[in-house]
Amino acid sequence: MNPPVSIKKVVLAYSGGLDTSVMLTWLKETYGCEVVCYTADVGQEEELDGLEAKALASGATAAVIEDITEEFARDFVFPAVQANAVYEGTYLMGTSLARPLIGRRLAEVASEHGADAVVHGATGKGNDQIRFELASYSVNPHIRVIAPWRYWEFTGRSDLIAYCREKNIPVTSTLEKPYSIDRNLMHVSFEGGVLEDPWSEPPPETYLLTRPVEKTPDDPETVLIDFEEGIPVAVNGEKLGPAALVRKLNAIGGRHGVGRVDLVENRYVGIKSRGVYETPGVTLLHAAHRAVESLTMDREVMLMRDGLIPRYAAMIYRGYWYSPECELMRKIVRETQTSVTGTARLRLFKGNVVTTGRKSPNSLYSFSFATFEKDTVYDQKDAEGFIRINALRLRLRALKEGGLD
């Protein structure tokens, strides 16, 4: 269904890429409305260069570029690391974690500018439309949403490129390299175009943050990461703020080719999608966090938390960051992390991350109990009764099936 036509002002989630560059001109032509371009700086780096000037030159009423990288790292990336949240066992969710924050701010900026609606560039096939809109509605349940991909006349990115040529809109996408790139502090993702064939190997220019393995150093590098209650606070002994810490680990991990993932994932709408991702710094954080947890978390608490990870990751992936169930899950995770303080030591080499040590003032590890040498605290004969009691139900089942009870 088409959006309301009585639109005087909108706030467009503007990246300056192909889709939103077209939308800026298309919105003005279609609705005759003012367009405020909002760009959330979540770590796109050089992609933001000249963006304000481009938006204004293209007819925007105003261009707002807001640095929210610190909030993104502190309130979204780090809580996901605390939970070891990974979607379908592989995807660290760099895009999934950024979208709720952007969607929330989009609605807030719309209120600040007295806009009638918010506009995003997500397609009707993907996850981002859901993430943006659920977040916007959580701030303003009455906000209008315009999603041009659902009803405009263009059928694909080739049409958009042709439109840009017709309207003299400057873009970097071409028919030869039309894949979509999303970059933030946490990762870079590549989708579409030449990557839509899951058998095709990503071209070398696909990657931005990580070196190919053949160009990584020939000597391994050791990295120390400190955690306080499950939150990373220092790298190699240097205390760093959230955004600076992720940037530092991106540089270290990327140098060694760490964090490349090529996967086919299940979108929320039911379509399988092939994505190529680079997440060097947060890959190191996940490995280090698990290492410190192995020393400090109770076995049954860890088992219970780990059982919730697939569900929690799915909540995040599907855009439910601001839902009651997701908020409850974050509270549960924080409670499990009160003892997760310590240091992990990692060795990086040729794309691999290997844990080589971990220590914590809250360690539950006891050398006296764990040693294979002679000890005075554990009577090995106790194991016999422990095993027989735990085997009782298995023995009874075998007796019943054998007709011997």
Image (cartoon, grey):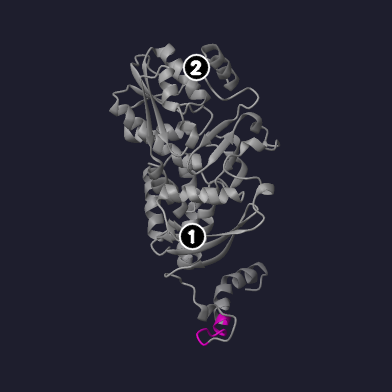
Q: Please, what is the three-letter code of the amino acid marked with disc 1?
A: Asn
Q: Say what secondary structure mark 2 lies in.
A: loop
| Foreground of the two, 211 or 136 | 211
Residue hosting label 2: 152
Q: Is the residue marked by circle 2 packed among few (<14), some (14-19), or many (20+) residues within 10 Å? A: few
Does any portion of residue 328 appear in the rendered image?
yes
The answer for how far apart the CA atoms under marks 2 and 1 are is: 52 Å
- Per the rendering, the mark at residue 236 is 1
Q: Is residue 88 above or below residue 347?
A: above
Which corner quadrant holds the C terminus?
A: bottom right
Task: Please give the name of the residue rendered at 38% of the width and 42% of the height, measured from the top-left corner.
Answer: 323
Task: Please give the name of the residue rendered at 46% of the width and 39% of the height, measured from the top-left corner.
Answer: 43
Q: Which residues are magenta?
A: 376-384
Q: Position of residue 232 (x, y in %)?
A: 44, 56
Q: Is residue 405 magenta?
A: no
Q: Is the residue marked by circle 1 packed among few (<14), some (14-19), or many (20+) residues within 10 Å? A: few
**Residues under numbered marks 2 and 1 in contact, where contact means CB atoms less than 8 Å apart:** no
Which corner quadrant holds the N terminus?
A: top left
Mark positioned earlier in the residue sequence (2 or 1): 2
Q: Position of residue 282 (x, y in %)?
A: 51, 50
